[in-house]
Image (spheres, grey):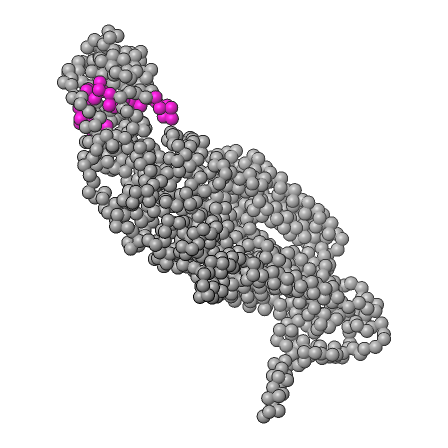
Amino acid sequence: MIENLKALPQNLRDSVVRYTLHPTSDRERSQATFHNLFLHLQSVRVHRNTLRVAYSFGLGLITTASFVLLTLTGILLMVYYKPSTELAYGSVKDIHFVVPAGRFIRNIHRWAAHLMVVAVFLHMARVFYTGSYKKPREFNWLVGLALLVLTLGLSFTGYLLPWDQLAYWAITIGANIANSPREVTDALHITKFLDVGGFQKQLLLGANYVGQEALIRFYVLHVAALPILMAMLMGVHFWRVRKDGGLSRDETAPRDPNDVFSPTKTYGLMAVVRGRTPAVGRGPEGTVQSWPHLLWAEMAVFMFTVAVTLALSYFFDAPLKEMADPAIPENPAKAPWYFLGLQELVSYSAFMGGVGIPTIALIGLGLIPYLDRDPRGVGKWFGGPEGKRIFWLSTVFGLISVVALLALTVNCGWLRNWIPSIPQPVITLINPGTVIVLLYAAWSLWILRRTASLRLSAVALFTCFLAGFVVLTSMGSIFRGPNWQFYWWPSQWPVH
Amino acid sequence: MSDPSRAYKWILLISSLVTLGFLLAAAARENVTAEWRHVQKDYQRILLAKAGDATSRRVAGQFPVEIRQVTVPALNTVDRCVSCHLGIDDPRMKDQPEPHRAHPKELLKIHRTEKFGCTVCHQGQGAALTFHEAKAEDYFWDYPLLPASLTEASCNSCHDPRALPRGAAAKLVRGMELFDEKGCWACHKLDGKGGQLGPALDNVGLKTKHQFIRANLKGSQTVWHWLSQHFRDPMGIVPGSRMPAPALTPVENEALTVYMLSLRKRSLPEEYLAPDKIEQKYARLHPPAPNGEALYKQYCASCHDTGLYTRWDKNFQRFVPAIRNPSFVRTEDDECLLANVEEGRPGTFMPAWGPKAGGLSKPEMEALVAYLRGAVKPAELAAAPAGGSVERGRTLFGRNCAGCHGAQGQGLIAPALANPVFQKAATDAFIAETIRSGRENTPMPAFARAGFGQAEIADLIAHIRKGFTK
């Protein structure tokens, strides 16, 4: 018995670790990897390309790391947060002022949320530009899109919880965006029979206004429903990354002559012997052991995310304005920043900005892998120099056209200013938002005709949309002041 | 052959060090260098210096450094001010600098901190732990810390200021007097009484700065700064405002600001209200006998002044009639005066003062009419000549009257004759007499002296009654 007690630490460790924590040979490393629930999500060996910083920039991992940070800090915040309109604001104030490390934790939660939204967008761009959505990764692209929507949903639902003026009016705007199909049903005089917008808003808020019902809905979505869904989809996403062949790479690139094996592989061995040959340190087909190389990379990206988030959280407090007051509207009332591009479009036409254009964009994104079946160009940024040229051209075109259109709208107004009696359906169909979509579509069709390549035309369209998104979002966040007027800088805003 | 994870190892090392650094810095910021910790240690030093005997030295030595707060569930407040203001109830701290100083005037003996907390009187963000955030002037908080000179404003929440011992809330009482003296009631309602040209002021003390037009407000953006600047120059702060500057000395300005800030519609638990506050609340049910002169000063004087002369109001851009002018009062009977007070003159700046509009009761209006009348008895008016012609009347009116009364009787610088209340209240005899004799001390001449006889007057009356197009 004494002996067993003495051996307890060793036995305990052996019982927990299925294989070994200190593998010495590649065989042991492989074993260590696939004998561990968490490590077996990755393959035993990965291609060297996977580890190239400039290929993936670790964006998927940054997103994951932000999610982990958000989950941890979110659980801590839940301990003190009270989802009631009476108590919510005070509880957030207490978190800010007296809860040990509360201010820091809330800041981390806020910054990690912003970081996650940014990283998820960039990750999507990276996957698109490296052609990584192509067969067999089409479905994972769709899962990724769902994760993008979930990320925005999580961020949006979290926005309301502090119950301050910023939250209240941002969600009021958001709910009105959900209400925007009314513009069409009103114009068709069918709102009485088919009130899609009203239904969406009711579903979101549980009432006609942002109140206790909305708060508890958003809370449940934010802390339970959406995170569970998110975690499940993330599992699917990772699993498919692994099953669909790992991180995408250029399969057609010429092999490094120093590689151990030629492309036609007929080997079956568990480890490569050490020795003084040129092949030492190189695995089959330019692969390396996941343990430790991929683990180093993952830990590095994870800690990098943590470090950036902590640095931001140390210096910049998460905003907390006055307590929500339905009697005192914020002017301008702005949605969360990633919806400000949409809010800018909503200011032209509620339906097009709130429903039409986002739906078109999401459907378009989802269709990309099923329309572009050309297997070439996977694993290379922009698929090669031609793609890169199209990318830059499209960036210029996308930026110039959207900026020109905004300049026109700001300086000369739009149809309503020119023909005051114009019926609303005309504006719903022809407004700066739809015009920019049409311009982008025309540009991409022109590229298609010129190059006869669906891939290049997709690059053109995606790039244009990205440029439009960036410009419209900046427009909404920086250049729009009270009454949604244009201002060069917030310091020019009139007080009230 | 280079190590493929070399770059990552460096990133990992540096990121980990940065993370560790910020974690330590955040821990230090909260646990070592926090403002309230310094304050409490200073306080302990003061305690030690003041300790006379061994016991108090030992107590001071064991003074715990911790967050302190006063929780008042009845007021829904948690005030952490006492984390730094530790000596407020310690008479030994009278000579110490803030934040250690004892609370002045021994007010805490009547208002125990445990029952009242701090923010119910001082406002400010009680939950905060730094002075900057507690003061909350340029912070996202609706009610920043009231400056000490304005704290009296809070007394009104639980006390009838006039019932307080003399001098206890001198500024507040002075402010209330000024509100009557300056005739603010003429345009502003309080508790349902008052004119309607300006906004009602019942809850102005609980308005936040976002509810004021601050485009022209220089300097501090607090509500009290807005109020005092606005009293100095109403039109400069609110463009287009018709409010005359109330001509206040700086001391009076502050007093009126305090009174404005004290107007808070807030339901406080009964146990917090002083008996006199409850009495004040129910005093309205048993109003004292109305005093016509006082009522006139409150509700009428700011436009009509003494009422003996017609005055040109530059904000309204018109003449305000002389309603206590003997020649006017003589021609009107009490019924007509009362109708004018009760219903006002729609379309002009004269509001209705009846119970449903300005909130004056019948006895109050009667007292007002009695005051307007003074010692002048209504004269027996000669019956008005009848049978005039609208056509001839129009010509006469155009030549002699339209310049002041407007071609359609809409009133320019002189009263509007087409006004329905005028048409209803004024008798033909009254109109005839006014045309004939004019109105002393006003620009209205006596047309009898210009040769108007019965016929002309009859024509004019016909026109005034029937000739204006609607």
Percent position of residue B291, x then y: 21, 33
Q: Between residue B208 and residue A393, name the one nearer to us.
A: B208
Q: Range of the magenta residues?
A: B312-340
Percent position of residue A269, x then y: 76, 79
Residue ID at (50%, 50%): B132
**Drawn side of residue A440 relative to residue B445, left or right:** right
Look at the picture and state if B288 lies above or below B414.
below
Look at the picture and state if A195 lies above or below B457.
below
Q: Is residue B315 magenta?
A: yes
Percent position of residue A135, x then y: 67, 63
Query: In the orientation shown, which residue stands out farthest toward the bottom?
Result: A1
Look at the picture and state if B58 lies above or below B423.
below
Q: In this rendering, does residue A222 appear at all?
A: no
Quarter residue A487 falls in = top right
Residue ID at (81%, 73%): A280
Quarter residue B438 falls in = top left
Q: Between residue A396 and residue A364, name the one nearer to us.
A: A396
Look at the picture and state if B133 lies above or below B377.
below
Q: Where is the N terminus of chain A found, in terms of image quarters?
A: bottom right
Residue ID at (19%, 42%): B286
Q: Is residue A492 magenta?
A: no
Query: In the orientation shown, which residue stands out farthest toward the top?
Result: B451
Residue ID at (34%, 21%): B312
Q: In this rendering, does residue B285 appear at all?
A: yes
Percent position of residue B411, x then y: 31, 21
